[in-house]
Image: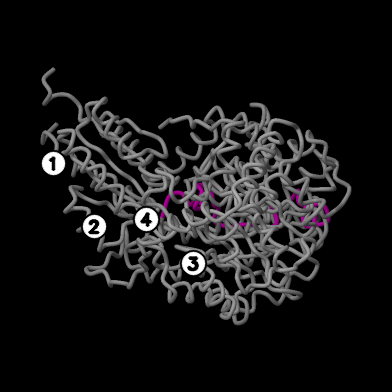
Amino acid sequence: MSNRDDMPRIAQEKQAWEEGPLKKVLDRFPERKGEFVTGSGLEVKRLYTPLDLEGLSYLDDLGFPGQHPFTRGVQPTMYRGRLWTMRQYAGFASAEESNRRYKYLLEQGQTGLSVAFDLPTQIGCDSDHPMAAGEVGKVGVAIDSLQDMEALFDGIPLDKVSTSMTINAPAAVLLAMYVVVAEKQGVDRRQLSGTIQNDILKEYAARGTYIFPPKPSMRLITDTFAYCSENIPHWNMISISGYHIREAGATAVQEVAFTLANGIAYVEAALDAGLEIDQFAPRLSFFFNSHLDFLEEIAKFRAARRLWARIVRERFGAKNPRSAMLRFHTQTAGCTLTAQQPNNNVVRVALQALAAVLGGTQSLHTNSRDEALSLPTEESVQIALRTQQIIAYESGVCETVDPLAGSYYLEALTNRIEEKARAYIEKIDAMGGAVEAIERGYIQAEIQESAYRYQKEIEEKKRIVVGVNAFQAEEEPSLDLLRVDPEVGRIQEEKLERLRKERDQARVDDALEKLERTARSDDNLMPAIIEAVRTYATLGEVCDVLRKVFGEYKALVNI
Amino acid sequence: MTKAEQPIRVLVAKPGLDGHDRGAKVIARALRDAGMEVIYTGLRQTPEQIVEAALEEDVDVIGLSSLSGAHNYLFPKVAELCREKGLDVLIIGGGIIPPDDIEVLKQAGVAKVFTPGTQTSEVVEFIRSRVRSGG
């Protein structure tokens, strides 16, 4: 970035270049397209120069890594100090089988666990519930009770790993089980580190695994905030997720805007519940998508960091610098993977992973090449993990902090995304905030509109997808695919039947009754949930008590 | 207007617990843009609810979408219930469906399975070719 004094001179020279050499070339060789845009449809100019950054202040807008507004990263040394956590989302079938996969991943050099739960678990149903038919153990591990959770982490010392759990509506219940497993391992809860996703708003907007209506759901979330702040200080008690919003079709700008708008709603709910901003804001974490437009994605991560820092400081008056620090997990974009020529997906994932690293992610999941066809095989998962290791150890991009800062294009794009996301957030504020905007269906409609536009662009070949609408292969190579044992459902049902016979039913009933009383009061729900799961009350039973008190969410159906 | 002149009616449904509805919604809108009448069920429908809705709405086509791996249980169940109720509709499916499963689903009564990368125009053409051709 150059001295302000140079600007008029640069503008003059730029004009001369445009009228002279550039024009000559354009007259003879027109460009490939009339209009160039990013993957999200933002205009891309031919050339970026210092003129595009005229209002930029290095100290106010970029600053130094580890310092407000954190544009250049949240740590002073970034990957020179410690690499990001390589965290592959995994878990399928039974707890025992998932436990074997986790041990394999840890042996392979993975540094954190990430638990995928099956859909019945995610919506708080036991494996023997009629709605669970055909779904048990399919997209993740089935957890019905503390017993399954004990098997899931058998032989894995919980003070040595950090565990991320993709669980939302019943997050408090799964966290309670984790706390009890740690206790049984003799691990102090203050030593636990990990994350629960616990982000219900994006479930209503994009992901679909909701149970209760927004109000009691927000209470469950603020109860976990209060409990974690006091008892599990290193736990990330929410992962405010743009990932699924993007997967559902949102643009990069919408991903930032809707995620941060949800973040604002959580902060406001916690403040309303009586928490202090600096008491919980440092433990808020985020989760973003890394999509195909390489430079736009890097700019997006930087813009999200800066915008959040400003919101937390300016709007909520946080004093602790850590409160304004946007730390995030990234996953490569599952929706960009193709069923055609699946090996090409290895390259897509590598580019997306590289963008996440250049954007300063704290942890990363790389998707496997076969995910448009089925759950990934062990071999595909290994390639995905190796992709991260090649970036980390061979590419050289980790040797300096925020290496692309100062690029005229990247900084201009970072400004642009921040500005456009801010405008969206103002619009959502005017509606009364994210909860209101979701209840009205506004956010869902915006995402749907973008998804439809994206598909049309592919069909009109305005957007090229290699192997799909261009460069198709005559014959598709076949991959070996993973199959989930269809017996899991039956095995879980048998386990449940045995558990219900063997446990002390009177204790279970007492604990559930106490839970119901707590749910009807204003007290924090966490202690009562912990006591309930300790008696081996099942996930379904705990959630049924809460359903009875809170009711269930009915989605707005709109296309 | 005779039945042959009426627009084709399609029920787009999400059976089971899967929450991925981007594909279902994009297809629903594309079919509507192609002149069909589309009803979208929303998430978390049991096969019974889907067939019930198909009867009530008097549809010509049921489009099922699942990305959770439960298709081998849910899709055939919908087909079976349609047969039981004497409902003569075209059943199509889409989502993350491994190639080996497609044959199994066809045997079970799912006329065609569309996987990721499908152009919406292919779905429109397929429905038109199978329902009141020319309708």
Give residue A360's quadrant in the image: bottom right
Chain hosting mark 4: B
User: Is residue A553 shown in magenta?
Assistant: no
Residue type, numbered disc 3: Val
Q: Is residue A208 above or below residue A1?
A: above
**Residue identified by numbered label 4:** B69
Give residue A410's quadrant in the image: bottom right
Segment tinted magenta in the rendering: A33-62
Residue type, numbered disc 4: Gly
Q: Are marks 1 and 3 on the same chain?
A: no
**Residue identified by numbered label 2:** B102
Find residue A349 and name its label: 3
Find numbered disc 1 in the image and state the secondary structure of the residue it sits on: helix
Q: How much space separates mark 1 and mark 3, taking CA atoms?
A: 38 Å
Q: Earlier in the sequence, mark 1 or mark 4?
A: 4
Residue at 74% x, 62% y is A73
